[in-house]
Image (cartoon, coloured by chain):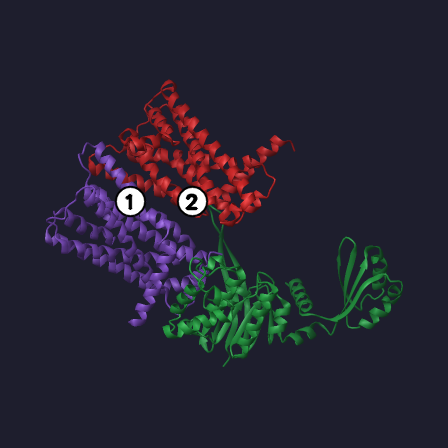
Chain colours: A red, B purple, C green
Amino acid sequence: MNPVKRWLRLYFIQAWFSYRALFAWSTPFNYIASKLGFPFFSMLLFIFLGKYVGLNDPVYIVIGNILLLPSLNGVMGISMTIGGEKQFGALSYLLGSPAPRSAVFVGRAFFHIIDGFVAVLIALPIAILVFHLDLTQTNFLWLALSVLLICITSTGLGFVMGVVTLLSRDGWMITSTLALAFYVLIGVNFPIELLPPVLKSISLALPMTRGIQAARMALNGAHFAELAPLLAGEVLIGLAYIIFGYALFRGVERISFRNGALDNL
Amino acid sequence: MLDFLRFARQQISVQLQIRTFNLYSLLLFFIQPAIFSAVGMVLSRAAGNAAPDLVYTVIGGGILGMWSGMVFTSTYDIRSDRRDGILELLIASPTSLRRIEAVRTFTNITASLVSLLVAVGAAVAIFHFSFNGIAILRLLLAVVILLYSLWCLGVFLANFLAWSRLSGSLVDFLELPMAFLCGFMYPITVLPQWLQGFSTVVPVRWALQALDATLLKNQEISQYWFHIGMSLLTATTFWLTSLWLDRKVHDHIRLTGELSSI
Amino acid sequence: MNAIEAKSLQKVFITRRGFWRQKRKSTIAVEDVSFQVEQGELFGVLGPNGAGKTTTVKMLTTILLPTQGSGSILGHDLVKDTSEIRKHIGFTFGGARGLYGRLTAMDNLRYFAELYALDPLYSKKRIPEMLEMVGLLDRSDDRVETFSSGMQQRLHLARALLHNPDVLFLDEPTVGIDPVGARELRQMVKSLQQAGKTILLTTHYMAEAEELCDRIAIVNHGKIVAMDTPSALRRRISPESVVEITVSQENAVVIEEMIKKLDGKLRMESISSLTEQHYSLFTPEPETVLEALSPALQTRSIQGLQVRNQTMEDVYIAIIEETSRDA
């Protein structure tokens, strides 16, 4: 088989199997509970918290929490499908195979990107119905692109956290903390301008921040010229994380051949 | 009595070592409450308030930490035991699962108290919250009733979760919905009337109303006792239900074979 | 009074398949198992994977409720008297699960000692005794997660014996243990029986069953297909001997021609490798077979020759194959 065809075949097939083996749920109820349960109720908590302190328009919070949904797949999901290999004892077999690592590693993102996008598609109509979200001004093309970009760039951070979970038994704890920190750091519940300068710098160094801003602007009818700087920034940050995550994985793999780091923990 | 105390001491020691003293507790007791409090504080600033609400935004974060700590440790106890093949050994021992879970839940609740204490400490040290004029005895009673409510719920949840491997998914729906419906970080009156009805049967809601109003010094004594009474009644109902569930669970899971995860 | 009684025990599991519309599927893990074990007896249960051995043990140790049938342990009913039964039984399952990895060996045993409501003074003496018995006393303060699977299995045995039960259930106790460790464990099991304990042992290892057990039940497809003493089971197949022949591949055809002439007088099994062919000829007349093969002996076509009695493994395989065919 020609190498490109083989690479593509490996990319898609193992993407599907790793998604099913390490992330998929056994029943529709489990799927809905995990994908929408926690995010939906945390959004409600923030809406009423906002109402109590005097913010009566929940739309900002609603939109932010919907745009956060891809991070569940991108960060938590990817780190689970990478860290899960070790938990299920399959990592040694993976590392001992001749499969090209780029297909195996980067391929894990594919179905999570789709899953994250679908989650937003499900949540938006619910938001329109329940919170009377007004989409009459929306530039749908750039909204879709921004959301897709968030789905992709969040996987970059997921790759990095996946390697952390491979190396450390408590890596998932760091991933969970990061996922919670998104509520503060990336413009989900309030504009990042309200953050202290230190936190704002962290915010700008994370993927999804610019994507979420761009998506909000697209919802208000912004055009490409206004969105371009944000989208370009998001692409660059996302690529940086993806490349760094992959390089980190290859580096750890090489070290592990010498000292068994990935096998022993 | 002495036998029970000895048994309890052993269970508490094991529970602290294997479940409580780990990094996950750090997340539940400190990090998550701090993040939710931070969101509340920034939203308060965005709304133009000069200072954050200390009772609901700061101390409420500590209450959330207690609740999350109880929910997750009690539920993970059963899930972990099932996965590690220990649930079978516990069920087949002469000591009832109900007794084991009662002591474990007590340990979890007591450990999670640290979240509330840290939140109160932050409110006092950073935001200069003052206890002047607060009825301390009533406050302490409200805290004790809150702990009792959490304990009753924890025991009920543990029995419920032992029922089936799949009931664990229900818990993912439990943590934040309760926080949202019971007014952990805002007065329950912020919710529409119809939503407030959902938490009528949840003992934590009533205990919190007694606790928060005592801290805010804006409650009549008759209302205080009403909230305490409702909390005791609903909590005890959950506990009695767990006694009934215990027998059912014991027979049901041995019939379905769901004592182990394989 | 028998130590263990099982009467027509049955266990059916219901599983669900599919994501959207879930279909129920019934699996009969144990169809109909009946037997009695006398006090002080060492009773073995053999069977292939999925035969129902572990499910039977779990029903008898009150971890599972039978779907149908009944049973008793020391006269106490399996369903009605579970709390009483639990005080008098100890059990281990094969594998490393069932211990708290983060706790030390000593702490694990202390934990279970409390669950079995053992007097603290008694526990203080008993726990080190048990650890010494299983050869783990010097590792008592090490965390169980640092133990090998064999060590964890031994710790399980110590746990099962803490409360000095009258009846022991050992489900594949030597699985994953090295030969030396396995032999030591078998010696422990034998001495426990000599101390008066009733033991029900499940195993895959025929030699182990033959060495240890007073009686053996062979289970297949959820039913007992044979039950007797090891020597009676061997006689049951037939009073056959086994003639084992090894020849090179070049000579295999010649040997097979000779064996064909004996058709009807024997049953043959063969295994081939790259350079050799090995035959096991089951026959009540080994001398007839040897006579027929003597030309090959004279021409040195046969590389290896041995005549032996049937082992427990031969018996087991024959019975399992016979019952699998009938099923």
Q: Chain of mark 2?
A: A
Q: Chain of mark 1?
A: B
Mark 1, other Cα within 10 Å: few <14 / some 14–19 / many ≥20: many
Mark 1 highlights which residue? Answer: B33
Residue found at x 42% / y 28%: A237
Give the Cα distance between marks 2 and 1: 20 Å
* Residue B170 relative to residue A88: left or right: left
**Looking at the image, which residue sits at the far bottom?**
C1
Q: Are marks 2 and 1 in contact (CB under 8 Å)?
A: no
Residue A83 position, x and y percent, is 47, 44
As drawn, A80 above or below B238: above
Between C253 and B44, the residue placed more toward the observer is: B44
Q: Secondary structure at mark 2?
A: helix
Can the viewer see residue B183?
no
Residue type pointed to by label 2: Gly
Residue found at x 25% / y 35%: B42
Can the viewer see residue A232?
yes
Residue found at x 22% / y 37%: A51
Mark 2 highlights which residue? Answer: A171
Between A127 and B175, the residue placed more toward the observer is: B175
Residue B237 position, x and y percent, is 26, 60
**Looking at the image, which residue sits at the far top?**
A225
- Between marks 2 and 1 in the image, the one whose residue lies nearer the viewer: 2
Residue C223 position, x and y percent, is 58, 67
Q: Secondary structure at mark 1?
A: helix
As drawn, B172 above or below C279: above
As drawn, A187 above or below C146: above
